[in-house]
C-alpha cells in the first residue's frame, strides 16, 4: 500500500498495454471482442493493433503470424512491450501461445474459448493439438460454457467468461423490458402465438430440429386450435435448405434474413425459442430476458448459465420435447408467469462493469 502526503499529487503510472488477438469472425465472438475493446479503451487501457489476421484454418501464413505476434508482445524500436495478451478462440489462442513462449516468460497470456471442436476427424485432431498448446502455455483460460472446462484441465486458472449482452442491467433493464412489453401492438388475430427465433442459419443452431417440432405441432393441431407463426431472424448457409423445407412441409415459418431491429421484434412476440445444438452464452437470450419474454430453449452449452431458472429448458435434439414445451406456453397465464421469471432473472445479468472487473483481474492489469 502507498501513501500520499497532504498537498502531494498521487503518482499515476503508465497506462497498461493489452494486445487483443482475435480471429476473423462474426456473431457472438466478434460482439464480445468489440465490447471488450470498448470497456478497456474507456478505462484508459492502450490496445495496440496485433497486425495479423487469424484465418479459420491452418495456413502457410501461420509462421509469419507467430513472428509478428512475438514482435508485438516484446516490443521493438519505438514500440513498447505489452503487459498482457488476450487471445480469443482456439487458433488465435494457440498461435499467441506459440508466440509468447513457455508459461512464465513474457507478458501474461489469457485465452477465451468460445466453441467446441466439431467436424471431421482431421479437424478434431487439429483441435486437440491446439488445445494441448494452450494447456501447456496459457496462464489463464476463460470458457463461455461449463462443458468447455474439462478441455483445459491443467491450466493454472480457469473460469467462466463474462459475456454481457450490452449496456444496462438490473433495474434499468427491467424497466426497459416492462416498457417493451406494454408497447406490444394489438393484433388482427389475438389468438395467434407469435414465436421469435434469432439465430445464424447454420447447423449449430439446430433449426432442423425446430422445423421437426413445428411439423409435429401442425400435424397435431385441431381445426379450431389457436394459430402459430414462427419468425426466424438471421442469415447463413442453411437458408436454401430451410426455405425448401418450409415450403414443402407448409410450415408456419417466415425467414426474415439478417435484422438490426431485434428489440422491435422482441416487443412484438409472445415466445422466444432457441433450438441450438450447442451455445456459449447466447446474447439473444439475454436480450429476451431483459425484454421480459417467455423462453423455451434447449439445455445446450452455457444456456442454463445465462437463463438460470427462467427458461423452460428441453433436451438437445428432441423435437417432441420442444413441441411440448411450446404447447405448454400457449396459455396466456403460463406465459405471464414465464415473463415474470425472465424479468427477475434479468436483474442478475452481468454488464460492462462486470466484464471490466473480470478483465482487470484475469489480465493482472492496474487501471490508470
Image (cartoon, rainbow, N blue to C red):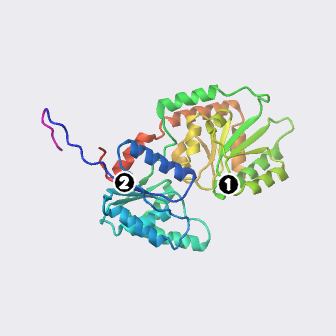
Q: Is the magenta region chiefly helix, strand or loop?
A: loop
User: On the rendered structure, is 366 left or right of 204?
Assistant: left
Task: Residue 48: name its quadrant.
Answer: bottom left
Residue under the point 68% across and 33% down: 268
Residue located farthest toward the front when viewing the structure as drawn: 78
Residue 184: quarter of image:
top right
Q: How far from the left and from the top, in percent, is residue 282?
A: 56, 48
Q: Is residue 206 left or right of residue 22?
A: right
Placement of the C terminus among the 4 image quadrants: top left
Q: What segment is highlighted magenta in the picture?
A: 1-6
- Check the image and report above or below for 307 versus 127: above
Q: Split into 4 quadrants, where in the image is the N terminus? A: top left
- Residue 18, labelled with which disc? 2
Assess disc 2: are there few (<14), some (14-19) or many (≥20) residues with their C-alpha within 10 Å of its C-alpha: many
Depth-wise, is mark 1 or mark 2 nearer the camera? 2
Q: Is residue 196 visible?
A: yes
Name the N-terminal-most of marks 1 and 2: 2
- Report how many numbered discs are placed on residues in the image: 2
Other-residue count near label 1 (Cα within 10 Å), few / some / many at <14 / 14–19 / ≥20: few
Magenta residue check for 210: no
- Front-lying residue, 79 or 249: 79
Q: Nearer the viewer, residue 181 or 241?
A: 241
Q: Which residue is mark 1?
A: 236
Amino acid at each position: 500500500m502507498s501513501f500520499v502526503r497532504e498537498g502531494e499529487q498521487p503518482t499515476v503510472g503508465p497506462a497498461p498495454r493489452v494486445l487483443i488477438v482475435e480471429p476473423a469472425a462474426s456473431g457472438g465472438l466478434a460482439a464480445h471482442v468489440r465490447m471488450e475493446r470498448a470497456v478497456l479503451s474507456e478505462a484508459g487501457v492502450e490496445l495496440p493493433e496485433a497486425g495479423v489476421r487469424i484465418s479459420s484454418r491452418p495456413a502457410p501464413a501461420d509462421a509469419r503470424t507467430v513472428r509478428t505476434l512475438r514482435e508485438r508482445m516484446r516490443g521493438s524500436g519505438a514500440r513498447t512491450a505489452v503487459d498482457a495478451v488476450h487471445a480469443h478462440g482456439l487458433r488465435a489462442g494457440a498461435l499467441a501461445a506459440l508466440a509468447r513462449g513457455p508459461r512464465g516468460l513474457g507478458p501474461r497470456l489469457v485465452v477465451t474459448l468460445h466453441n467446441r471442436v466439431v467436424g471431421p476427424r482431421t479437424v478434431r485432431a487439429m483441435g486437440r493439438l491446439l488445445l494441448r498448446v494452450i494447456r501447456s502455455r496459457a496462464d489463464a483460460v476463460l470458457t463461455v460454457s461449463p462443458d468447455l472446462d474439462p478441455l483445459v484441465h491443467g491450466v493454472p486458472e480457469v473460469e467462466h467468461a463474462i459475456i454481457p449482452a450490452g449496456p444496462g442491467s438490473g433495474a434499468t433493464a427491467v424497466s426497459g423490458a416492462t416498457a417493451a412489453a406494454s408497447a406490444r401492438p394489438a393484433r388482427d388475430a389475438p389468438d395467434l402465438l407469435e414465436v421469435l427465433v434469432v439465430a445464424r442459419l447454420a447447423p449449430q443452431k439446430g433449426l432442423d430440429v425446430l422445423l421437426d417440432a413445428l411439423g409435429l405441432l401442425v400435424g397435431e393441431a385441431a381445426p379450431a386450435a389457436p394459430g402459430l407463426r414462427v419468425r426466424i431472424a438471421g442469415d447463413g448457409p442453411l437458408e436454401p435448405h430451410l426455405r425448401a423445407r418450409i415450403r414443402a412441409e407448409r410450415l408456419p415459418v417466415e425467414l426474415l434474413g439478417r435484422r438490426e431491429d431485434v428489440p422491435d421484434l422482441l416487443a412484438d412476440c409472445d415466445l422466444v425459442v432457441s433450438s441450438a445444438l450447442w451455445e456459449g452464452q447466447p446474447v439473444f437470450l439475454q436480450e429476451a430476458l431483459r425484454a421480459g419474454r417467455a423462453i423455451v430453449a434447449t439445455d445446450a452449452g452455457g444456456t442454463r448459465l445465462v437463463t438460470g431458472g427462467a427458461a423452460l429448458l428441453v433436451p438437445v435434439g428432441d423435437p417432441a420435447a420442444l413441441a411440448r414445451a411450446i404447447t405448454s406456453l400457449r396459455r396466456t397465464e403460463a406465459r405471464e408467469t414465464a415473463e415474470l421469471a425472465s424479468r427477475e432473472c434479468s436483474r442478475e445479468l452481468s454488464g460492462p462493469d462486470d466484464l471490466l472487473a473480470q478483465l482487470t483481474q484475469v489480465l493482472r492489469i492496474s487501471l490508470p
